[in-house]
């Protein structure tokens, strides 16, 4: 260990600590911008400067502690330098905070407030006409970029997509796709992980709140919402709850107050996905079909394999995602059951994901001429909408999901965490194939935050070896295995975002690995407390087949619930 003084307080820390970590240990906050707890140290924004006993300035995020060091985190020199750094960053930044989606949640704005900088008197160099509006998911606004590089690390090293990169030198240095292309012209998968780490408003989702409210205020339109598995354990963070707390009942109440006519659960169509995908797997196992079979519900992952490994598309399950299965049912089964024509139904998805916006707009995702899903709101947008009409979740009582999709299983709930689709599928595939009940429904090796996990199960005489993968770097590794014929697995769950959907690009800001873990715990406690924990035991799913779909993988099921992919 080594002992040093920070602001005259003595602290003893491990030798490999940085000054920033040592200060944190004794409750001293040093301002940061380019630093992110889950990322590499970059030390490029220079806001975390501190002074040593010789009057020398050093970056706290990148300077390792030394025994006997004496550090000041505030002094005249430190403060004036930090203010100068902020002014320089601001001189290159669009200062129209009121019009920014990150207003109130921007790390730069917070520091400017603390340092009392309302505007800079340095010459503004920023060109404010640089918004990339080329796609349905993500807006990139160059005028707000502070060049911290967090998004580049995420895009290049965690997701290995490399849609975002660096260009030029010195004062022309910028973060941009190669050749300054728009995101739609790159391999961007629209996962929004870049948004999750952006400290300012340079990257944000394409909001659809106004479209949704237009539909709600139209008396001729029946507006329904579906809530994704991961949203209920994270949206509470926007209202002061800890990550992982399930606020599903309050969220339903809030959305009713917003004006939605019915609120449904995507967990229901997650159960349906398990039945369709499970039977598809069984059929591939029995009929020498293409194996390993890859799950197909995470739209960022679909964009990734379509763009980079098109020859492996036959490995994908043909099942649509639960979001789109719900959309298709809303314009067909629900429409006829309720006697409301599909053109009068407006279906909104509440999702932790920005790629879901792109998925909903895909050409093939329609039922007859109707879009299956009309609008997608991220968890953040949903919280913003609820706050905009002055509702606070905290004061609401719990409400329930509506019929005819009001019951779902614990297996549907765990879709929101990496490993959940695998575990849910194994529960059903095992029991369907063996006609025996599982003694233990918990496939714990599928759970947790690790990027690649393995599960092996004996189903009768078949040994099923599965892998669970989250994050596209890990997906790439598995795809390379398949490509080279060295993949030992039969069934592989892939989720685009680290930790699965609970870590989606539309989730509340501040999704560190620790927060992702707390949300995962919340998801598994929903399953643990569920009375139904197997998708095939969901009575409403059984009824849906009796009334409408006939049997798993039927012609009707294929028309509505399955899709194809674009090389
Ligand atoms: Fe997910 Fe899904 S689990 S992708 O993460 O399969 O977004 O939460 O809604 O569709 O159900 C996201 C979450 C979903 C879908 C489900 C799947």
Image (cartoon, rainbow, N blue to C red):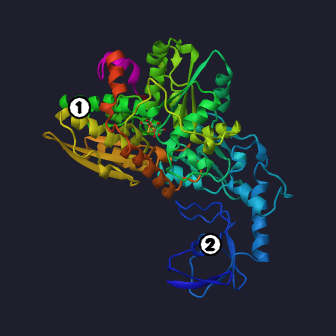
279 is higher (above) or lower (below) than 459 = above
Q: Position of residue 304 (x, y in %)?
A: 45, 39
Which structural element holds mark 2?
loop
Could you tell which of marks 1 and 2 lies nearer the N-terminus?
A: 2
Quarter of the image that includes the C terminus: top left
- The residue under the point 18% across, 30% down is 286
The answer to whether any part of residue 419 appears in the image is no
Question: Cα distance, mark 1 to mark 2?
Answer: 56 Å
Q: Quadrant of residue 405?
A: top left
Mark identifier at residue 556: none
Q: From the viewer's perspective, is 310 left or right of 77?
A: left
112 is higher (above) or lower (below) than 283 = below
Which structural element holds mark 1?
helix
Q: Position of residue 430 (x, y in %)?
A: 22, 38
Mark identifier at residue 282: 1
The answer to whether any part of residue 223 appears in the image is yes
- The magenta span reads 548-564
- Residue 294 is a magenta residue: no
Q: Residue furthest right?
A: 121
Residue that badge 2 annotates: 27
- The residue under the point 39% across, 37% down is 412
Q: Nearer the viewer, mark 1 or mark 2?
A: 2
Q: Residue furthest left?
A: 461
- In this view, the residue in front, 406 or 155, is 406
Q: From the viewer's perspective, is 566 left or right of 223?
A: left
- In this view, the residue in front, 450 or 343, is 343
């Amino acid at each position: 260990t080594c002992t040093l003084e920070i602001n005259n307080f003595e602290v003893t820390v491990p030798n490999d600590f940085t000054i920033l970590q040592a200060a944190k240990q004794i409750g001293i906050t040093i301002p940061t911008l380019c630093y992110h707890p889950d990322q590499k140290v970059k030390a490029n924004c220079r806001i975390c400067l501190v002074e040593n006993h010789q009057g020398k300035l050093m970056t706290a995020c990148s300077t390792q502690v030394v025994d006997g060091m004496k550090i000041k985190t505030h002094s005249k020199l430190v403060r004036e330098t930090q203010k100068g750094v902020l002014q320089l960053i601001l001189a290159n930044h669009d200062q129209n905070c009121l019009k920014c989606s990150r207003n109130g949640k921007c790390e730069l704005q917070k520091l400017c407030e603390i340092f009392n900088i309302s505007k800079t008197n340095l010459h503004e160099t920023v060109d404010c006409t640089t918004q990339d509006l080329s796609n349905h998911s993500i807006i990139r606004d160059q005028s707000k970029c502070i060049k911290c590089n967090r998004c580049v690390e995420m895009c290049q090293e965690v997701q290995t997509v490399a849609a975002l990169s660096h260009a030029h030198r010195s004062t022309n240095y910028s973060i941009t796709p190669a050749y300054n292309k728009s995101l739609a012209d790159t391999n961007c998968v629209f996962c929004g992980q870049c948004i999750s780490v952006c400290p300012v408003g340079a990257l944000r989702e394409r909001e659809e709140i106004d479209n949704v409210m237009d539909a709600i205020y139209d008396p001729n339109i029946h507006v329904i919402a579906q809530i994704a598995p991961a949203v209920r354990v994270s949206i509470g963070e926007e209202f002061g709850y800890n990550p992982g707390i399930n606020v599903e009942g309050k969220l339903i109440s809030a959305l009713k107050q917003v004006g939605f006519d019915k609120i449904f659960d995507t967990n229901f169509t997650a159960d349906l996905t398990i039945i369709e995908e499970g039977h598809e797997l069984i059929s591939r196992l029995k009929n020498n079909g293409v194996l390993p079979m890859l799950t197909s519900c995470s739209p960022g992952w679909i964009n990734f394999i379509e763009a980079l490994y098109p020859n492996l598309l036959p490995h994908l399950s043909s099942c649509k995602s639960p979001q789109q299965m719900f959309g298709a049912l809303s314009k067909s089964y629900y429409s006829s059951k309720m006697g409301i024509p599909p053109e009068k139904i407006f279906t909104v998805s509440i999702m932790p994901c920005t790629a879901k916006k792109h998925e909903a707009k895909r050409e093939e995702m329609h039922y007859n001429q109707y879009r299956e899903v009309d609008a997608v709101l991220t968890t953040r947008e949903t919280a913003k909408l609820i706050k905009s009409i002055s509702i606070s979740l905290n004061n609401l009582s719990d409400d329930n999901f509506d019929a005819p999709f009001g019951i779902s299983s614990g297996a549907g709930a765990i879709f929101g965490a990496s490993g959940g689709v695998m575990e849910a599928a194994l529960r059903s595939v095992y029991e369907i194939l063996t006609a025996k009940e599982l003694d233990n429904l918990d496939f714990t090796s599928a759970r947790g935050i690790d990027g690649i996990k393995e599960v092996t199960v004996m189903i009768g005489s078949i040994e099923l070896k599965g892998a669970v993968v989250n994050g596209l770097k890990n997906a790439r590794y598995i795809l390379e295995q398949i490509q080279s014929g060295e993949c030992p697995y039969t069934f592989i769950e892939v989720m685009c975002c680290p930790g699965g959907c609970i870590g989606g690009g539309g989730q509340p800001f501040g999704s560190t690995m620790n927060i992702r873990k707390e949300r995962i715990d919340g998801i598994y406690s929903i399953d643990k407390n569920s009375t139904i924990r197997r998708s095939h035991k969901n009575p409403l799913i059984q009824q849906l087949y009796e009334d409408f779909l006939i049997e798993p993988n039927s012609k009707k099921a294929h028309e509505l619930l399955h899709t194809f992919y674009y090389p």
